Amino acid sequence: MTTTTAPSLARGARRRLVVLTAVRHVATGTVLASWLLTAGARGLEPAAVGALVAVVGVGTALLELPTGALADVVGRRVVLAAAAGAAGVAYVLLAVAASLPALWAAAALLAVAQALASGPLEAWFVDRVGPDPDAVRSGLAAAGTATGLGLAAGGLLAGALAALGSALGLPERGGPGLIALSVPVLGAAVLAVVEAVLVVVLLRRAPGAPGPAAAAGSPSAPEAPPTASVGALLSALPRTVASGAGLAVRDGVLRWFAVRWLLVPVGFLALELLGPLRLTELLADPSAAAGVLGPLTAGCFAGVGLTAAVAPWLARRLGALPAAAASTVVAGVAFALAGSGGAALLVAGVLLGYLASGPGNPLLAPLVHERVDGARRATLLSVRSLTGNLAVAAGALALGVTGDLAGTPWAFVLAGTLTAAAALPLLGVARARG
């Protein structure tokens, strides 16, 4: 590849990354804001709604490593297209189904879609741009911006489409068939179809672009040869899972990153779990709490997207590791203080915590990708996602128990403390790299 074509290929890969990230997260934001409300409008009790969430969480965690290995064995584009297809079918089921078995089937499909989509697009991008950390950081910063703004836009779109459903005369509640809240979920299904088409069109190898193996310096390409049999592909999955997961254990740098992956996600529960509980306590009115939580959620997602864009500048001025450590500590302190006052302090603390968290992944991802070749890249990203899912599950239990025993403000303190502690493994990363 010539020096004149390399920047052009990197820009093209970054544009594809941003477009596909934005489309997927607009759909995700639309569903996040509406699917559990849709289940409740079908008459499901809170326990049954919680069971749906558990199906998605447990199913995603169980499938993370196999689907990451699948992306390394059969190719990124195939797996991403399958993820969009599974999501589209799941959304249609959620929009029209009313029975618990049908909703469980939709939740299971949603878990499949999330697991399939959790790493291949980032892996594809790093494969395309090669080992240049500046190109990787710039692209992932742009993708972080697209993620945050896409989730925020999806939340706003969900409200508009739900209002459209009501304006069309659809019932607010009911059994099988369409209700007003079905409209935003069906809108997400349309976006999933658009995403599948874009994946097929945009992830074709650009003329002159290196293959995944060439970009990563790996002797074995993660794109399956066209003549490979299904049996040969399936037999390669266990080896790929073992190799990618083993790398996270054997490599000294990745071991420290794994510790960080177990701590960082807990802080985000300050919004998703503790925010609604604390606002209800402070405002004594669930409707008023919902009125604050909606804009706060949109602001947090948008804020993460905007601050992700400054990661390349922070890396140049401070260095990737010091900048990530500082932003992690700021986020932890903000989350810890968010529950110690009134609603205004909660909004300010949670929002600041999310803003400070935005640059983290773009700052550190190049340091992760430099430790892995293309043949195991998606598998390692699935290890990261699996670790995060486990952290969220354990953190939700710990924060819930702390809130019951000591009060919600102390649960915020625990969430913030664990978040700030995620800066400590970066010292180990620095020593292992040095």
Image (cartoon, rainbow, N blue to C red):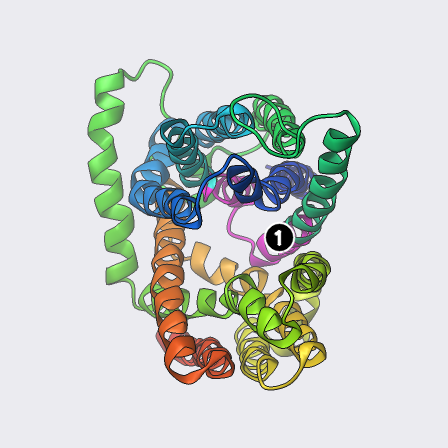
Residue at point 35%, 58% (across, down): 387
- The percent coordinates of residue 134 (x first, y second) are 61, 58
Q: Residue at x 54, y 26 (%)?
A: 88
Q: How many marks?
A: 1
Residue 235, by quadrant, is top left
Judging from the image, what secondary structure is the residue with disc 1 in? helix
For residue 170: magenta?
A: no
Q: From the viewer's perspective, tell me whether residue 410 is left or right of residue 57.
A: right
Image point (52%, 42%), residue name: 40
The relative height of residue 372 versus residue 6 in the rendered view (above or below) is below
Give percent across and percent down for residue 217.
Answer: 41, 44
User: Disc 1 residue type?
Assistant: Ala
**Residue 107 % position (x, y):** 42, 36
**In the visual, does 361 lie left or right of 99?**
right
Magenta extent: 118-146
Q: Nearer the viewer, residue 68 or 349?
A: 349
Magenta stretch: dominant SS? helix
| Residue 430 in sight here | no
Name which quarter of the figure residue 212 lies in: top left
Q: Which residue is mark 1?
A: 135
Disc 1 residue crowd, few under 14, some 14–19, many 20+, Cα 10 Å: many
Is residue 171 toward the left or the right of residue 371 in the image?
right
Judge left or right: residue 306 versus residue 86: right
| Residue drawn at (21%, 46%) of the image | 242
Rendered location of residue 279, percent (x, y): 62, 71
